[in-house]
Amino acid sequence: MSRTRIVVVGAGFAGYRTARTLSRLTRDTADITLLNPTDYFLYLPLLPHVATGVLEPRRVTVSLSGTLPHVRLALGEADGVDLERHTVTYTDPEGTRGELPYDRLVLTVGSVNKLLPVPGVAEHAHGFRGIPEALYLRDHITRQIELAATAPDAATCRARCTFVVVGAGYTGTELAAHGRLFTDALVRRQPLRQGIRPRWLLLDIADRVLPELDRRLSATADRVLRRRGVDVRTRTSVKEATPDGVLLDDGDAVDTRTLVWCVGVRPDPLVAGLGRPLERGRLRVDTHLQVPGHPEVFACGDAAAVPDLTRPGTYTPMTAQHAWRQGATAARNVAASLGSGARRPYRHRDLGFTVDLGGAQAAANPLGVPLSGPLAGAVTRGYHLAAMPGNRVRVAADWLLDSVLPRQAVQLGLVRSWSVPLESASPEVARLPHPDDDRPARATEHPPPEETPDAQQQ
């Protein structure tokens, strides 16, 4: 008899955990294929470390083929699912179309940058969801400081060393905290004009930073940011963006060459094309992570609306902590559907949250115990090392070297601005030039009317 064909779409936290658990549970009874645009799993919480020169990019990537035994990797981006024919269509990195038949399907396509109808943002802002965006931002920050150091006038110097981050969730807060330390280190080597220092603005329409977390964690992060010199502005956002600056909704105009869009994430547009019920853009599933009406299809992670059994009537938030746990549950339930073990509903217990604020600073509440300062920093980095499925020694070594050596302030020029557009359904892959001319290809999809707030990390 032929072996059961299992296809897992996406290798984020949910997809990677699903594939890894399935490889153990169904080793001799199923063929597992993992479809993903890249050949690595990205440990997204450490992306700010890449953008600010603490970690090299490969440190936060884990090889799929090297860590997933008995799993076949199909390189490509899924662009359609036929629920009746039981097939997934995709396009590989060289543009060739492919098709994968399945007996069991696990959709873990994750999320992409959330867009808002703010004039100029799509053209002049960049997101922060993948390695290409982090590499671009690292080069861009370095370049702006270098250009500011030789600017012909004070106004240009100030504009180039002003950095605006929109969104004070996990991503924006950590990026602003790390970014301030990075630019301070850069100007120690390349001093700016007398009296000018790098300026970081962190904006959010909420009344505090990290609004989705406990107020004590929020207060700790706010205190560290302000003490470091970050201009934190709550109840404030961008009204319009231009090549030379941003206009805020409070009427203030800020001259800048850097606008980083961290307002949150939205489910991958792929799930909207399935024709199944959605919840704020997320695919509805039952407590066993199965799609109603299609028991052979499972979904979890950011693109799935999973009922929260600890808070009836709600859905689990879009966090890496949930995605990782849901991946294990999905794998066990897929195995159960093949006669191995018993299926179980997804139920969770919060382990707490950590926010890395750069240097020795962090905010954390492991198991509900609030921590701050160096102790929280040690807990946060310990958590990341324990949670990473690979590269632990390399990451720890880079952290150690960063604590005793100056960071390398060089531009590699590998990622250009046009290759990481904000309007992209696949931020993990840099865009390529258009085949017919020299213009860059840009994504044209539009966001759904309802979107999901930022909660990328633990």
Image (tube, helix red, strand yellow):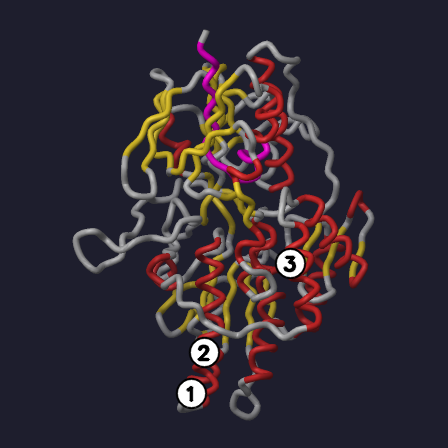
Q: Residue 97, how many percent across, how many down?
A: 28, 33
Q: Nearer the viewer, mark 2 or mark 3?
A: 2
* Stretch in magenta: 2-17
Helix, strand or loop under label 1: loop
In this view, the residue farthest toward the bottom is: 194
Q: Which mark is residue 208?
A: 3
Name the residue type under label 2.
Arg
State yes or no: residue 193 in magenta.
no
Which residue is rendered at x = 45% and y = 45% of the image? Answer: 112
Label 3, residues with CA under 10 Å away: few <14, some 14-19, many ≥20: many
Which residue is rendered at x = 53% and y = 62% of the image? Answer: 51
Report which residue position mark 2 lands on.
160
Q: Which mark is residue 151?
A: 1
Which of pointers 2 and 3 lies earlier in the amino acid sequence? Answer: 2
Helix, strand or loop under label 2: helix
Q: Residue 368, how many percent across, how many down?
A: 80, 45
Helix, strand or loop under label 3: loop
> Measured along the vertical axis of the image, is residue 168 above or below residue 455?
below
Q: Are marks 1 and 2 in contact (CB under 8 Å)?
A: yes
Name the residue type under label 3.
Arg
> Measured along the vertical axis of the image, is residue 131 above or below residue 306?
below
